[in-house]
Image (tube, coloured by chain):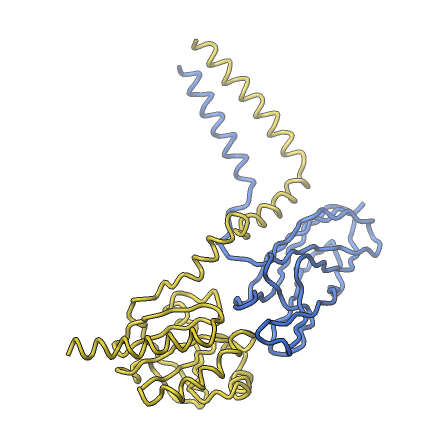
Chain colours: A blue, B yellow
Amino acid sequence: MRAIAAGTILLATLASAQQGTLPAPAAKVKQYVTYSAEEQNLAAGKKSVIALQFRVADGYHVNSHTPKSELLIPTNLTLQPDAGVKAAAAEYPAGTAYSFSFEPGEKLDVYTGTFTVKVPVVAQAGQHTIAGTLHYQACDNAACYPPKSLPVQLAVTAK
Amino acid sequence: MRRALVLGVMVFGVALLLWAGWHNLRERKLAMQKARENQVVLIPEKQGEASAESDELAPKMRGKKAPQFALTSLDGKKVSLADYKGRPVLVNFWATWCGPCKVEMPWFEQFRKQYGSQGFEILGLADDADAGKDAISKVAMKSGVTYPILLTDGKVQDAYGGLEVLPMSFYVDRNGVIVEQTAGLGSKDQIEANIKKTIASGAVAQAGGL
């Protein structure tokens, strides 16, 4: 009986040790854009481009990086500085034209579906994890949602 | 039986150890997993977009007393909901970056003129006070709005149930009760029907209650 108890305790300890390596759950925030994390393998010390792929939930749109009105909130990516990865300014795709059905005359410049933000970098040899945030503001066909920040994490391996 | 159990637990333990070793060897994989974990936690859409959506749009405040507020108007005056006690009031939250909000604002202005004689008033609460007074004022003017536009203080949004959607409107009757709450742009007819309902609600309570 004791052996079983000891075994169970061992198992429980192992299980919790493994769990400890997982990140704590973040506060529940409703997001309209998702980030597809993809490991980036680069040549060390050379100019390379990191591509971050995002997906706007079906039925929603977000303003592009260059919306047509100063009142609109642009989609913007910020990456935290990393000692091993020198990053230049992010490059954003062009948006597509969109109009609300109730306001056909006003053309907006938006992202829908997937869009990719590219960041030119020079990475030192090794493995790096870069944290960043995508700031965006989404609407659907009849309502808008307050600006959101989507955390992103990039795993970069340079050889 | 006991031996079999002990053996079972041991085999499982060894298997788990092997798995743990394998798991820890792949640090990069874990980093990726971390990034993906984040993704899963942060994006509840997959678990039922429809239900999350309906929660958000559920009129949580309907039937409740309208929370009091005292805010500064664009012309620098202190305006509180209590100033309109005994009158039907439409409390409308909007923002300069919200396209659908700007569509209904001219309708509100029209209905205010139409139903003003029955005491009806509209208060437009700009949810994006950080846009600055000038930008808010410009948008209000462009929409032809003459009803009071108030600058929010970050607290009033929470008092009204947190604003996850704009536009968001609260129809407050003469007794200070929220008789209707709407999220997103509705039709002009629907807005007018809500206004009529709000005016009537107070009137009935007055006639019956006093």
In the depicted structure, whether residue B67 falls above or below residue B34: below
Closer to us: B24 or A48:
A48
- Quadrant location of the C terminus of chain B? bottom left
B26 sits left or right of B99 in the view: right
In the depicted structure, whether residue B18 falls above or below residue B71: above
Closer to us: A152 or B177:
B177
Closer to us: A83 or A16:
A16
Closer to us: B116 or A73:
B116
* Picture coordinates of residue A25, whole percent (x, y): 50, 48
B203 sits left or right of B169 in the view: left
* Picture coordinates of residue B116, whole percent (x, y): 35, 88
In the depicted structure, whether residue B99 falls above or below residue B161: below
Q: Residue at x 55, y 45 (%)?
A: A23
A151 sits left or right of B185 in the view: right
- Quadrant location of the N terminus of chain B? top left
Q: Quadrant of residue B27?
A: top right
Give the residue at the far left of this rendering.
Answer: B210
Give the residue at the far front of this rendering.
Answer: B189
* Picture coordinates of residue B49, whole percent (x, y): 51, 53
Q: Residue at x 34, y 84 (%)?
A: B120
Q: How many marks?
A: 0
Q: Residue at x 18, y 79 (%)?
A: B207
Q: Quadrant of residue B182?
A: bottom left
Q: Residue at x 75, y 55 (%)?
A: A50
* Picture coordinates of residue B26, whole percent (x, y): 67, 36
